[in-house]
Amino acid sequence: MPPQPASPRQPVDRAPGPAPGACAVGVDFGTLSARAVVVRVGDGTELGSAVHTYRHGVIDRSLPGSSAPLPPDWALQDPRDWREALRTAVPQALAAAGVGPGDVIGIGTDFTACTVLPTTADGVPLAELPDWADRPHAWPKLWKHHAAQDQARRINALAHERGEPWIKRYGGRISAEWQYAKALQVLEEDPEIYAACARWIEAADWIVWQLTGAESRNTCTAGYKGIHQDGAYPSPAYLAELHPGFGDFPATRLEHPLLPLGSRAGTISAEAAAWTGLKPGTPVAVGNVDAHVTAPAAGALDDGHLLAIMGTSTCHVVNSPQLAEIPGVCGVVDGGIVAGAYGYEAGQSGVGDIFAWWLRQGLPDAYRAAADAAGEDPHEHLTALAAKQPVGAHGLVALDWMNGNRSTLVDHDLSGVLVGLTLDTRPEDVYRALLEATAFGTRVIVDTLTEHGLPVTEFTVAGGLKKNALLMQIYADVLRRPVSLAISDQGPALGSAIHAAVAAGAYPDVRTAAARMGGVERNVYRPDPEAADAYDLLFAEYRSLHDHFGTGADLLLHRLRRLRNAARARSATPR
């Protein structure tokens, strides 16, 4: 069935708020770029924006200026790219908006997570120091750095062996993407870097440090990525059992007062004012995660309202008044999304990245030429071809694990699977199967939440992929529920501006600010019963593959990963 037309834009309930004129700046630090947006505080109107593309992007082959290959599953970034974004995107957004620094009452930022870096005591990244710049472990580890899977397995096994209560808050498994697995990898593989690391800090907090000149930490990243539950980090005894040198990790490298979301971390320093064009003393909101900060921008703060922020990966966040134990979630944190509710997070480590991978690997020159002739980009071209197919016509089922599985298996040594290939299989067939695979992965997450006491009452999408009408219709059909869309195309940046408005005192809390500044178009895509029936059959096959390749003591995908890593290690060893 072709994608259904969007419903008319629906008004959002508006609470009383400040008079128009005052503005807030939100800056969203993504995987490949940072976007700044200037927002009118009174009604959430986006007045201007600018994008800064990182010079170094994702560092996964070799360090800048080096030819030495990085090991498999590494993904790093350069903090100078983030600092440069403040110097370029913020002034450009102000200019585009026609707004002067005196009109800006606050600035807020968000970041990919867990993107984490080792620094000195005063916040200088070790990667920027000559003594350490040639050491990979000195560089920030991007969220998609998955080389700490072995450490994650040991963290989980020991937590269950000791009966650590916090492991239940993370669906029974800490991810290789989170703080502790990455820090333990540094300690074990480069103890000199670990010893030189005075602070181990989320980029979400580090960028605020750059703006204010003072360290701060937020409850969101500490709770979801830093195993901070019920006012405490894991015990020194547990950590020392993992490694004798790890027992004091939180006390020496993490411990700092935690600030709730929407609070003020400080004000713009004179140095940061020179970078950004903002006035010294402008309030700065406490740091936040790109997914969680989007919820108020998308009108998705009500209990049971699941928000999927879909880009290179997908993060699913939902609030609930109840604390439940749900297998494979990334975490549940009191106030992790908004005060007064338990915030649940799940996710998929590869979504848009998977579609982009297929265009790089599987698109013949003839297709590119046809796309050019039609005035389409390759994604649009393949989407149009795939949309003509009846459900199941390609004869394929894929597992969406090209970047591992974040939820609910929490295993980044898993890899993608594509079943049903024939000599008649065309590029658009595979493309559609990959679109469907990500929808099936989301259905596993939604079903798991529902089955374990967290009913999903509404499903909303934010992020760049919401523009793909075929993809959104597939999600509606696979989930058998309507798909709503965030109104803003800059959800995280708008969410950061909302938090900036609260930190500046324009609103008493995030919920009130969100009612004025955020918004959602409800039920834009509705499930087609015939397509949904067909997808139920395909999902049953997906689930069969999911359980066969993703569960068990000795998995084929793990064996293949070990063979690959061993072969690459041999080829990288000097002879």
Image: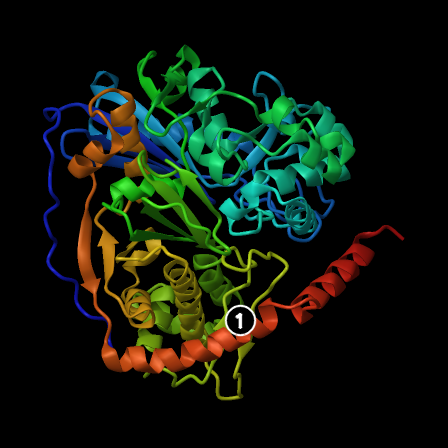
Secondary structure, mark 1, is helix
Task: Classify residue 11 as left or right of residue 482.
Answer: left
* Amino acid type indicated by mark 1: His
Tell me the residue at 71%/68% (across/down). 554
Model colouring = rainbow
Tell me the residue at 53%/44% (across/down). 143
x%, y% of residue 88?
Answer: 39, 29
Count of marks overlaid on the render:
1
Tell me the residue at 27%/43% (across/down). 301
How many C-alpha atoms fall within 10 Å of the one at disc 1: few (<14), some, or many (≥20)?
A: many
Camera-side residue of 376 and 164: 164
Camera-side residue of 499 and 258: 258
In the image, farthest residue toward the right: 575
x%, y% of residue 117?
Answer: 59, 32
Above or below 513: residue 153: below
Q: Is residue 396 visible?
A: yes
Task: Classify residue 225 as left or right of residue 30.
Answer: right
Residue ID for mark 1: 546
Q: Is residue 119 visible?
A: no
Q: Name the image quarter holding the N terminus.
A: bottom left
x%, y% of residue 297?
Answer: 26, 41
Camera-side residue of 307 and 464: 307
Camera-side residue of 150 and 120: 150
Q: Within the image, what quadrant is residue 478 found in?
A: bottom left
Task: Classify residue 63 as left or right of residue 497.
Answer: right
Task: Classify residue 481 as left or right of residue 346.
Answer: left
Above or below 515: residue 359: below
x%, y% of residue 22?
Answer: 17, 23
